[in-house]
Image (cartoon, helix red, strand yellow):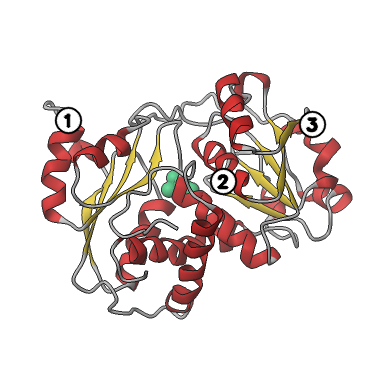
Amino acid sequence: MRSFLGRDILTLRDFSREEFFRVFEVANDLRRYAVNRRNTDLLKNKTLLTAFYQPSTRTRLSTEAAMHRLGGAVLGFSDAKMTRAGDFYQESIKDTVLMLESYGDVIAMRHFQEGAPAEAAKWASVPVINCGDGWGQHPTQVLTDLYTILLERGTLDGLTYLLIGDMRMRTMHSILHALSQFDAEAIVISPPDMALKPEFKAELDGMGTVYREAPDVREVIGEADVIYLEPVVQADYTQSRVERGTEVGRTPPELQVTGELLRTRARRSSIVLHSLPRMDELLPDVDETRHQRYWVEASNGVSLRMALLALVLGAAE
Ligand code: CP
């Protein structure tokens, strides 16, 4: 297994099965701090720098919470407009990162441009963690999702994963990469204009990810162990900021999960995950069902990101 020390976390495409389980093992070790709301001093001499060019609630705050739990310092920006990268100068990733690397020991970056964290990693002498790049990848979210499934179901193998939503989304790319390392079958449902792209399908075929496409959640939900949703009504991830207009589309029933659908057609043991925020693909009546796991999923993001920070900064082997 490759060492995590000093490593950039940019994609799950190159994660081995062993590496997934190493991250989950460290998350299990550190989880008690997050669960008991206690801090340790494992990273007391280290500083996390968060460079968020796109809005975030969960990813930025859970990454920052993780560093606080580990006893490290945190600084950064959550609105690039307040930096030279977002004003008249539009300072480049290279010029920005060559400053940031002096101010912290690890950089957590979200960007509206696919590949921006990889570009940052080219210039930074400290590890860069991709916290979501355009339509590209969202590795820390999907590590959190898989960790949640492992905690809730006790395994990642032998499960059927029902993926519903816009298949161009970064979480969908990352989870389909990750599933290549497990004995898993994915069933994929999206509107036709948001379907898996041919070049991405070719990549998945090359990696050995097992998946098939289906037209309607109502027809296949009974096969699923994990029901994994993303919006089909959403912001354009390639822009820095988009205000929500008055015209917001509605999710059609073939892509919607409701309490009624779960009660009548889902396996009793199936769990529902959503990286959030949600629109109307996941109705609030699911919150009270036995299947709902998205709140604990968001909470597990702290332990999982503690593990990543500890690994890339050498506090865990
Ligand atoms: N899951 C996720 O990426 O949420 P945020 O956009 O709030 O970080």
- Which quarter shows the C terminus? bottom left
Check disc 1 and report the residue beneath it: 92
> In this rendering, is residue 26 above or below 235?
below
Q: Position of residue 139 (x, y in %)?
A: 46, 47
Please rate how many residues cluster around mark 2, counting C-alpha atoms within 10 Å: few if below 14, some from 14 to 19, many from 20.
many
- Quote the CA–CA distance across marks 1 and 3: 44 Å
Q: Earlier in the sequence, mark 1 or mark 3?
A: 1
Check disc 2 and report the residue beneath it: 178
Q: Give the farthest residue toward the right.
A: 264
Residue drawn at point x = 83 percent, y = 46 percent: 223
Q: Earlier in the sequence, mark 1 or mark 2?
A: 1
47 lies left or right of 221: left
- Which quarter shows the N terminus? bottom left
189 lies left or right of 113: right
Could you tell me which secondary element the residue under label 3 belongs to?
A: loop
Could you tell me which secondary element the residue under label 1 belongs to?
A: loop
Q: Is residue 84 visible?
A: no
Residue drawn at point x = 20 percent, y = 34 percent: 93
Q: Amino acid at mark 3?
A: Asp
Disc 3 or disc 2, which is closer to the eye? 2
Per the rendering, the mark at residue 286 is none
> In this rendering, is residue 28 above or below 86?
below
- Quote the CA–CA distance across marks 3 and 2: 24 Å
Q: Amino acid at mark 1?
A: Ser
Q: Which image quarter: residue 83?
A: top left
Per the rendering, the mark at residue 216 is 3
Q: Position of residue 216 (x, y in %)?
A: 79, 31
Q: Position of residue 245 (x, y in %)?
A: 46, 26
Q: Amino acid at mark 2?
A: Ala
- Quote the CA–CA distance across marks 1 and 2: 31 Å
